[in-house]
Image (cartoon, rainbow, N blue to C red):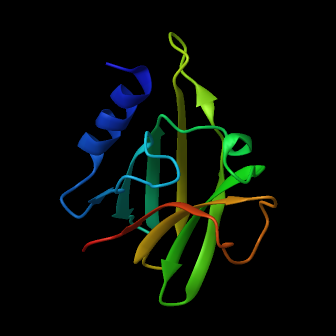
């Protein structure tokens, strides 16, 4: 089992029954990518989100090439930039993966990963690579 999957599974076990696992459908742009997120409301009424992606290609290998992946939450209050997703290489293989832990005070209704040339955007561009609804 991959080391980052072990950490992901361990973090899943720590969550209570109020957590939601989001499975992202296969992407037309990066079909090899396998993405999951866990959304949980914490004691401060914020939504903690743990994102895990396997087989994620570098954004500069997309067509057209981009510089960054950005993680977004679509909420009743609009889109919120949750941060940059950096592609990493697994220790014992050449497989690429990404992980991100973040939070938002707003209930996420949809999670989106876009490819961008800027990371500090206020709203996602049109190049969406992965997206999924959050079911509560």
Q: Position of residue 34 (x, y in %)?
A: 39, 43
* Residue 68 x/y as whole percent: 73, 51
Front residue of 98/46: it is 98
Query: Residue pushed farthest top?
Result: 92
Residue 96 in view, yes or no: yes
Eyeballing the image, is 114 above or below 57?
A: below
Residue 135 location, quadrant: bottom left
In this orientation, which residue lies closer to the viewer: 8 or 90? 90
The residue that appears at 39% across and 64% down in the rendered structure is 42
Q: Residue at x 57, y 67 (%)?
A: 72
The residue at the far left in this view is 17
Quarter of the figure that contains the C terminus? bottom left
Q: Image quadrant of residue 24?
A: bottom left
In the picture, measured across the screen, residue 20 lies left or right of residue 56, that is left
Residue farthest to the bottom?
A: 76
Compared with 23, 13 (above or below) is above
Count how many numbered circles sit on residues in the image: 0
Residue 104, given in percent of the width and then of the height, sits at 53, 70
Q: Is residue 66 left or right of residue 39?
A: right
Work out whether residue 105 can be spotted.
no
Quarter of the rendering containing residue 4: top left
The structure residue drawn at horizontal position 44% and vertical position 45%, both measured from the top left corner, is: 31
Nearest the viewer among 96 and 85 is: 96
Task: Name the residue located 47 percent from the left edge and 90 percent from the top edge.
Answer: 76
Q: Position of residue 70 (x, y in %)?
A: 65, 58
Quadrant containing the N terminus in the rendered view: top left
Residue 32 is left or right of residue 10, and the answer is right
């Amino acid at each position: 089992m991959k080391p980052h999957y072990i950490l992901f599974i361990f973090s899943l076990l720590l969550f209570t029954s109020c957590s939601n696992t989001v499975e992202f459908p296969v992407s037309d742009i990066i079909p090899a990518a396998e993405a999951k997120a866990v959304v949980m409301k914490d004691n401060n009424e914020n939504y903690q989100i743990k994102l895990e992606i396997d087989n994620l290609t570098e954004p500069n290998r997309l067509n057209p090439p981009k510089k960054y992946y950005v993680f977004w939450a679509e909420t009743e209050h609009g889109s919120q930039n949750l941060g940059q997703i950096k592609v990493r290489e697994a220790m014992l293989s050449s497989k690429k993966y990404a992980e991100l832990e973040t939070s938002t005070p707003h209930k996420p209704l949809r999670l989106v990963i876009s490819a961008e040339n800027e990371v500090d955007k206020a709203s996602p561009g049109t190049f969406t690579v992965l997206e999924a609804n959050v079911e509560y």
